Image: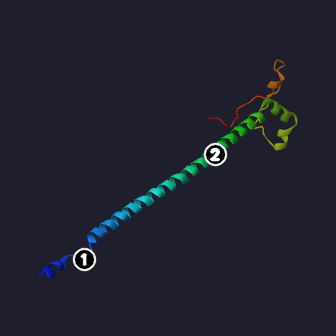
Amino acid sequence: MRANRRRHANIVPIASLATGVLLALFVCGAGIYCVWCKNRLHSIGNEIKGLERRLVELRSQNEVAKTKIARLSSKATLNERRSSNFFAKLGKFDDILTWESNTSAARADDEDVRPVRNRSARP
């Protein structure tokens, strides 16, 4: 009769084996996810460093352009270009530039060219 009692008992404990396998899969999945997050963090950090370097480069280029604009729009440069007839070579600039003639003797020579707002740029 002892043989009948053991007939329903499993020889291989499937429930505890399945629990162990599922636990191992969960731990492996969590480890792989942590490694993926770390790699993603490093790649985004490298991308941010590159973008910050590019931003510094663009800011320096912007400063260079601002100084060049200031140098080229100075009164001395504009007077020099006016005397060399530079603007006549480019075409019609009467709508953009307004030259103020030196009719008053009280003005100094450096005030020949003054910035004037364009007539078509009204708000």
Closest to the observer, 43 or 12:
12
Q: Which residue lies furthest to the top in this view?
A: 106
Locate residue 23 relative to residue 84 in the image: left or right. Answer: left
Name the residue at 27% across, 75% down.
12
The kind of secondary structure element at disc 2 is: helix
Residue at 13 percent of width and 80 percent of height = 2
| Residue 69 position in % (x across, y down) | 74, 37
Q: Report if the CB atoms under discs 2 and 1 are less than 8 Å apart.
A: no
The spot of residue 98 in percent (x, y) is 77, 33
Chain-order first, disc 2 or disc 1: 1
Secondary structure category for the residue under label 1: loop
Viewer can see residue 103: no
48 on left or right of 75: left
Choose mark 2 or mark 1, whichever is in front.
1
The reply to whether residue 67 is in sight is yes
- Density class for disc 1 (Cα within 10 Å; few <14, some 14-19, many ≥20) is few
Q: Name the residue under label 1.
A: 11
